[in-house]
């Protein structure tokens, strides 16, 4: 699997958009970008995934650059409950082995 | 809907003791897996299974055994606990389509088991 690089931490103001970057410069053509988050000590929660097109769901938007070497997860209106560790993962869709790096600790402040 | 259920939530062991962490899911998911999470770190894959009778090793399998006799259950066994196995353990599951990851690839996680080995 391609390696990902995320900033270790970032702050965000409540009500504002949170833009979480992820670099994956060695991504291959058949690897997808996945985002999960882990709130406090709970199990991780799936957010969104994509291959090359931008994706949006009820939780977030995923913007993938044209060369697919980086992506941004956007939380459009961050709330205090969005405070969590966010993991960016790239993997081949049929790969059963999925591990999580250190992620980005996002703190939403009132 | 119970989802993925892990028991116990907390456990303290002495070095050399054995125990089994339980994981059960009621979603008829073929794929199940075990992760460990050490303080300040991400999750590392221990073992996984793509169906009853089929298991394989992940990134950090040493010191752990698994079996998958039913679709619902995927227990993780520590045969001789060591302090290095102190960690939080998460179980996860997802459905597969035709034996391969299909369109629904969300991993569903349990709430975790916090294990301390003294």
Image (spheres, coloured by chain):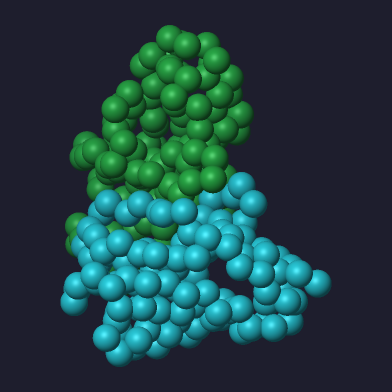
Chain colours: A cyan, B green
**Above or below A68: residue A27:** above
Left or right: where A90 falls relative to A35: left
Left or right: where B109 falls relative to A51: right
Q: Quadrant of the N terminus of chain B?
A: bottom right
Residue A16: name its quadrant: bottom right
Residue A101: name its quadrant: bottom left
Tell me if residue B29 can be seen.
no
Provide residue B25's location: percent of width, then percent of height: 45, 46
Q: Quadrant of the C terminus of chain B?
A: top right
Q: Residue at x 39, y 30 (%)?
A: B76
Tell me if residue A89 can be seen.
yes
Left or right: where A91 falls relative to B108: left
How many marks can you see? Answer: 0
Instruction: Name the foreground residue: B94 vs B16.
Output: B16
Q: Residue at x 26, y 64 (%)?
A: A2
Provide residue B72's location: percent of width, then percent of height: 39, 42
Provide residue A32's location: percent of width, then percent of height: 29, 72
Q: Residue at x 38, y 24 (%)?
A: B77
Residue B101: name its quadrant: bottom left
Q: Residue at x 39, y 31 (%)?
A: B75
**Above or below A12: residue B117:** above
Provide residue A86's location: percent of width, then percent of height: 52, 63
**Above or below A87: residue B18:** above
């Amino acid at each position: 699997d391609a390696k990902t690089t995320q900033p270790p931490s970032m702050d965000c103001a409540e009500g504002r958009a949170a833009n979480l970057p992820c670099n994956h410069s060695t991504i291959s053509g058949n690897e997808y970008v996945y985002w999960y988050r882990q709130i406090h000590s709970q199990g991780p929660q799936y957010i969104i995934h994509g291959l090359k097109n931008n994706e949006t769901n009820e939780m977030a938007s995923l913007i993938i650059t044209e060369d697919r070497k980086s992506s941004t997860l956007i939380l459009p209106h961050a709330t205090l409950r969005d405070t969590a560790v966010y993991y960016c993962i790239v993997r081949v869709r049929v790969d059963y082995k999925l591990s999580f790096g250190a992620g980005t600790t996002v703190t939403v402040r009132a | 809907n119970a989802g993925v259920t892990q028991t116990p939530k907390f456990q303290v062991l002495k070095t050399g003791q054995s125990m089994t962490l339980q994981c059960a899911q009621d979603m008829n998911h073929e794929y199940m897996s075990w992760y460990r999470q050490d303080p300040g770190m991400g999750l590392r894959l221990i073992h996984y299974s793509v169906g009853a009778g089929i298991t394989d090793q992940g990134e950090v399998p040493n010191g752990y055994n698994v079996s998958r006799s039913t679709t619902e259950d995927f227990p993780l066994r520590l045969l001789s606990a060591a302090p290095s196995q102190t960690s939080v353990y998460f179980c996860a599951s997802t459905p597969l389509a035709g034996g391969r990851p299909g369109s629904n690839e969300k991993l569903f996680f349990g709430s975790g088991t916090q294990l301390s080995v003294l």
